[in-house]
Image: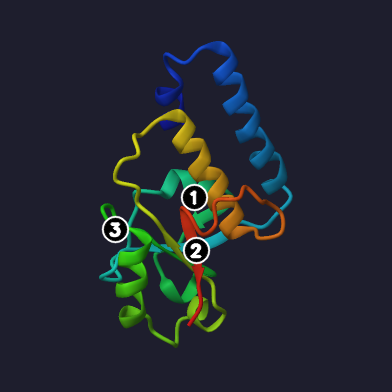
């Protein structure tokens, strides 16, 4: 949680406590669930590591072998959901298990978003909802991210 500690510096105690409670809720729920293998790719199908800590805190584990992944999260800095919806279909391989099982997630990069504690916690919640549908509902699907079906 080292990157979060840095983001929490300077927040008032009440805000820190609220964000910590949100993280604790996710942590408590996922400790009873299997870690989900996740490949995080850009639109060139290159593995990305930018979200590795967030994925881990949300109950996933970064997987570099696409054939071992249960989910694929397409994320690329500077790309919106519209960009991803336009570009991702042409790079999908129908032999990949996440593609066969319709477990493809497109994650928006809100270029206006600052790297704040609130945004980081919100992203962890969103990834938990992506990886554990039915266990989490935070309400950002369709806005910040979407499930993409082939």
Q: Relative to the observer, which residue lies in front, 6 or 84?
A: 84
Give coordinates of residue 133: x percent, y percent. Answer: 66, 60
Q: Which of the labelled discs sits on residue 146, or is there none?
A: 2
Write the residue at 51% across / 55% down. Answer: 61
Q: CA distance from mark 3 to mark 1?
A: 19 Å
Q: Relative to the observer, which residue lies in front, 26 or 136?
A: 136
Numbered disc 2: secondary structure: strand
Q: Is residue 132 above or below residue 51?
A: below
Q: CA distance from mark 1 to mark 2?
A: 16 Å
Give coordinates of residue 23: x percent, y percent. Answer: 60, 34
Question: For this view, does 57 lie left or right of residue 81?
Answer: right
Write the residue at 54% across / 77% down. Answer: 102
Q: Which of the labelled discs sits on residue 55, or is there none?
A: 1
Give coordinates of residue 29: x percent, y percent. Answer: 71, 45
Instruction: Say which residue label 3 marks.
Output: 79
- Crowding at label 3, few (<14), some or many (≥20) Cα neighbours within 10 Å? many
Numbered disc 1: secondary structure: helix
């Amino acid at each position: 949680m080292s990157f979060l500690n840095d983001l929490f510096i300077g927040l008032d105690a009440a805000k820190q406590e609220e964000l910590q409670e949100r993280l604790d809720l996710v942590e408590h729920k996922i400790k009873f669930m299997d870690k989900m293998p996740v490949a995080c790719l850009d639109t060139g199908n290159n593995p990305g590591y930018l979200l590795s800590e967030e994925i881990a805190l949300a109950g996933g584990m970064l997987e570099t072998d696409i054939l071992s992944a249960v989910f694929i999260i397409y994320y690329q800095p500077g790309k919106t959901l519209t960009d991803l919806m336009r570009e991702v279909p042409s790079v999908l391989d129908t032999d990949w298990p996440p593609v066969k099982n319709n477990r493809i997630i497109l994650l928006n990069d809100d270029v206006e978003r600052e790297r704040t504690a609130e945004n980081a916690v919100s992203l962890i919640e969103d990834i938990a909802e992506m990886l554990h549908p039915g266990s989490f509902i935070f309400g950002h699907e369709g806005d910040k991210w979407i499930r993409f079906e082939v």
